[in-house]
Image (cartoon, rainbow, N blue to C red):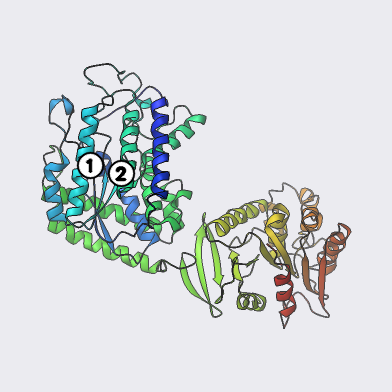
Amino acid sequence: MNMNRTRWRFSKLSIWSFGLIAMLNMLAGSAFAEEQPKPLKGRVVVLGDSITYAGQFVDYIEAGLKLAQPTNAFEVFNLGLPSETVSGLSEPGHAGGAFPRPDLHERLERVMQKAKPDVVIACYGINDGIYFPLGEDRFKAFQDGMRRLHDRALAAGARIIHLTPPVFDPLPLKGRTLPAGRDSYPQPYEDYNKVLDHYSAWLMAQKAQGWEVVDIHTPINEFLAAKRQSDPNFTLAGDGVHPNEVGHWLMARPLLDYLVPTADFAKWADANQMAAHYPHGAELLKLVQERQQLLKDAWLTDIGHKRPGMGKGLALAEAQQKAAALEVQLQALLKTSGESQNHNAPFPGKRSDWNGFERYDFAIDGIIVTAICPKQRLPGKPWAWKGEFLDAFPGTEIALLGRGFYIVYVAIPDMLGCPEAVQGWNTCYQELTSKYGLARKAALIGLSRGGLYCYNWAAANPDKVACIYGDAPVCDFKSWPGGKGKGQGSARDWQLVMERYHFKTEAEALAYDKNPVDNLAPLAKAGIPLLHVYGDADDVVPWEENTGKLAERYRQLGGGITLISKPGVGHHPHGLTDPTPIVDFIIKHFVQ
């Protein structure tokens, strides 16, 4: 049914319904403490109306679960039927009088017998009030229909998860809705979403009876209200009912978060962002969509229904055969993507060996992050963040891993510590600490050009830094790669500085006053201890123009810095033959 509405408004009833949902959630979380939701297993059947049949949110659920739990064995079948209700109700003249709304219970027994689900996910409600104001008889029919569905699933030995109804939005239907107080509603009641608020509140209350219920209604309401603050004409559904792709993602996301809370699906604005987070995620999502499209009409036809105008699809056996071939491709993608980590892995992504330690490579907002885990993990998860060249001269990092530190590397090469690189580090830091539990402060390791990354990020975030170890670090890009002093310079990298920092002229670059040697006050104020190891014969990153200048200025500001000189040594090799002094420095100053 196509619909629209005047404008998004919240009444006292809406506020009451939201409050009731929040109160019931609180009660369900205290008096009726819930266990961690179990992962989906076996055959999962999704029931619902035209929104379910459209299928995007079903696709997103299946793809999200496969990506987040690639070793979990399950299959998802979309058996949504357009126009269907769980209440058995239909408004007069539905579909222009062509047919009444289908009743789920007319086909439910066949669904259970033929599909044999291990899990049922049910999304009903938007059609069940038949677009009238709240009425006692209609509300009771919805409640009774939900109870019948719930009981039948349990009787078949299936787990059932209920989703609260999606949202009705009258804004796109301006001039085509009707006010309260009428006997008939050939067009939708203008405040029908308040009816759905009420239905959602009742469903959430059933959690106290042990039902599994996931609220999608309230988050979509809140999302719309927030968007309308800046764009009064914003909508998720062109007809007021059937959501667009973002709307379907907002339906899928609460269930994904419920089933896999460690994956933090809430940080992605749409399914494409989710897919981009995982290796081969976009390809996998496309295959899931192909498989779902292939099977749903075949299954609906085989089970049987009373809804005219539906496509028959392929014969079920043929559709299943084609779907099996797609499933082989899906499993191959999961295997080659390296997403075979077990559920208890400390990080997602590809797992491999790094000098005898467990290494994980994964993406944060499109940035590839490497996290290497110690074998004996210390409380608080202390960590060292290497600015560049993860695999170069790793003696210090290996020693730190042996002492219980995590090592992190963020792959933003050729950015030379520019503001965009700092922002990328900010994004990664937030997720590494909030999602994966790394310590609030990091020890920074700035090897060569990595000094630009470490010092520039530290100056912007001094409260997040425990200490800095610089190894022949670049502290002034005028020295390297600019070559404006004693050093050789690098024409290629100097051009990168011009581009990455968006300088229009070389004079603008030379006048820049935020190089590490110029921007030490925030570090000194925060009392961040520094250690520099350098070769006094370095003609690539001359120590006098970098470490020497930085040390002098930092001490003038009251900061503390330790210097370890390597007589007669150039830019290479980095580090110390025995890294104990470096490791002891980092451990001593790793104060959270």
Q: Position of residue 564 (x, y in %)?
A: 81, 75
Above or below — where is 501 with respect to 548? above
Q: Which mark is residue 191?
A: none
Residue 242 is at least partly visible in this image: no
The secondary structure type at the circle numbered 1 is helix
Task: Using residue 297 as the reference point, say whether residue 351 is left or right of it.
Answer: right
Query: Residue 281: horizontal and vertical position, in percent?
Result: 40, 58
**Of discs 1 and 2, which sits in the foreground?**
2
User: Horizontal placement of 110 versus 221: left or right?
Assistant: left
> Type of residue at label 1?
Met
* Rendered position, 508 above or below 321: above
Quadrant where the C terminus sits is bottom right
Q: Is residue 498 above or below residue 205?
A: below
Could you tell me residue 566's position as x and y percent?
81, 79
Q: N-terminal of the two: label 1 or label 2?
A: 1
> Is 349 left, or right, of 157 in this rendering?
right
Question: Within 10 Å of the Cα at label 2, are there few (<14), some (14-19), or many (20+) other Cα atoms?
Answer: some
Which one is in front, 272 or 523?
523
Q: Is residue 285 left or right of residue 146?
A: right
User: Looking at numbered disc 2 in the image, what kind of residue is underneath it?
Assistant: Gln
The foreground one among 433 and 452 is 433
Disc ID at residue 206? 2
Q: Are marks 1 and 2 in contact (CB under 8 Å)?
A: yes
Residue where numbered disc 1 is placed: 146
**Residue ID at (62%, 67%):** 382
Rendered image quadrant of residue 367? bottom right
Q: Which quadrant would residue 374 be assigned to in this image?
A: bottom right
- Cα separation, mark 1 vs mark 2, equals 10 Å
Q: Tag 2, which secondary structure?
A: helix
Q: Residue furthest bottom?
A: 577
Q: Tell me, yes or no, if residue 267 can be seen here.
A: yes
Mark 1 Cα-neighbour bin, 10 Å: few <14, some 14–19, many ≥20: many
